[in-house]
């Protein structure tokens, strides 16, 4: 049996990048192993896009180093070692999908057979369509096909399911699991936190140009010591007024329910069942927080500065 490569697939060391007065990256260290599926999360301006641009050679650091499969990002991109799916990647609106893919396929150093690309990206139904006639979700599938053309060992996906409805997103990730099964390293940035929780073996959260959390989805979610309480029968402002409730809002995934993050779930439950609101609540559920709650907690600049946040993450940051 051949041993696994000792060097990581992606190796970022002490990266810094400043644009004017804005420090986009502030000493980022990140090593991603061969075959990992990693979700890169962060609010707007966190540094995700800058880090991803450096992985493919579209930006250079002021300090630090970037290595992709042991080589520099420009060489890795030119030789097809890394494939990129950018959310705003330019397409040719007057071309058919087939003609554009044939043209780009001919430019690859080590191309994947085009029929395999079409199958893995699930775009056989789009091949005769003009690019300009595609929906946002269909255009994303074509961008994914372009990322596969060079048969890359590393795939970098920026908001891959933007513009897709729920069914299309599920179908995309079904295809992605087959692509990942070949041992490729996959890094994807997303604002759909449930995708990160479900699809990624590792989650990295960036904020203010730094890596502030790194672990499995469960490990990152476990940073938050609170509990989530959902119920029916109360308005969000009523639930928010109870002692021990940090925040409350309608549950977007289940109309009619209200969802609260509780710092002291015992106090909240006592108030619900013995106070003035007793008898009005029903279907009360208490659960551990998910990745969404952890993400909001980690990137909350109003209630905690970075020093306290980093301390809270002790044990979950690699």
Image: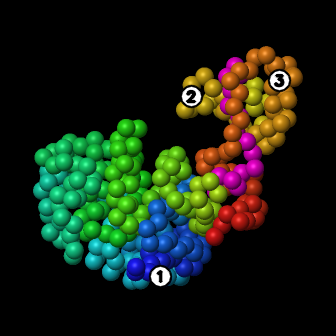
Does the stretch in magenta take in 230?
Answer: yes
Q: Position of residue 212 (x, y in %)?
A: 64, 64
Residue receiving disc 2:
254
In this orientation, does residue 250 appear?
Answer: yes
Residue receiving disc 1:
7
Residue receiving disc 3:
273
Q: Secondary structure at mark 1?
A: loop
Choose between 185 and 276: the one closer to the eye: 185
Which residue does the image show at 17% across and 52% down from the upper left?
97
Q: Is residue 56 left or right of residue 283?
A: left
Q: Are marks 1 and 3 in contact (CB under 8 Å)?
A: no
Choose between 308 and 153: the one closer to the eye: 153
- Segment colored magenta: 220-235
Q: In this rendering, is residue 35 above or below 128?
A: below
Q: In this rendering, is residue 308 above or below 247?
A: below
User: In which quarter of the view is residue 108 placed?
Assistant: bottom left
Q: Is residue 115 left or right of residue 204?
A: left
Quarter holding the C terminus? bottom right
The Cα atoms of the two marked residues, 1 and 2, are separated by: 45 Å
Q: Position of residue 290 (x, y in %)?
A: 63, 46
Does the stretch in magenta take in 122?
Answer: no
The Cα atoms of the two marked residues, 1 and 3, are separated by: 57 Å
In this orientation, does residue 208 appear?
Answer: no
């Amino acid at each position: 049996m051949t041993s696994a490569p000792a060097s990581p697939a992606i190796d970022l060391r002490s990266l810094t990048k400043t644009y004017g007065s804005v420090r986009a990256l502030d000493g980022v260290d990140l090593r991603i192993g061969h075959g990992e599926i990693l979700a890169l999360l962060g609010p707007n301006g966190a540094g995700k896009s800058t880090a991803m641009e450096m992985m493919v050679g579209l930006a250079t650091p002021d300090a630090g180093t970037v290595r992709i499969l042991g080589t520099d990002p420009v060489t890795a991109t030119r030789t097809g070692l890394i494939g990129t799916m950018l959310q705003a990647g330019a397409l040719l609106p007057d071309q058919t999908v087939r003609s554009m893919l044939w043209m780009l396929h001919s430019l690859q150093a080590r191309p994947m057979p085009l029929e395999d690309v079409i199958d893995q990206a699930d775009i056989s139904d789009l091949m005769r369509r003009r690019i300009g006639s595609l929906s946002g979700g269909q255009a994303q599938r074509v961008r994914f096909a372009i990322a596969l053309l060079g048969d890359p060992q590393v795939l970098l996906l920026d908001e891959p399911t933007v513009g897709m409805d729920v069914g299309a997103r599920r179908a995309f990730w079904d295809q992605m699991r087959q692509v990942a099964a070949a041992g490729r390293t996959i890094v994807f940035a997303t604002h759909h936190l449930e995708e990160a929780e479900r699809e990624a073996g590792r989650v990295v959260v960036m904020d203010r140009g730094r890596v502030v959390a790194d672990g499995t989805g469960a490990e990152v979610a476990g940073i938050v010591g609170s509990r989530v309480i959902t119920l029916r029968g109360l308005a969000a402002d009523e639930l928010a007024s109870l002692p021990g409730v940090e925040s409350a809002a309608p549950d977007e995934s289940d109309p009619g329910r209200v969802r609260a993050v509780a710092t002291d779930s015992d106090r909240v439950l006592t108030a619900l069942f013995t106070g003035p609101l007793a008898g009005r609540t029903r279907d009360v559920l208490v659960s551990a927080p998910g990745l969404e709650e952890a993400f909001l907690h980690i990137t909350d600049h109003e209630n905690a500065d970075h020093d306290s946040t980093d301390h809270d993450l002790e044990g979950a940051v690699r």
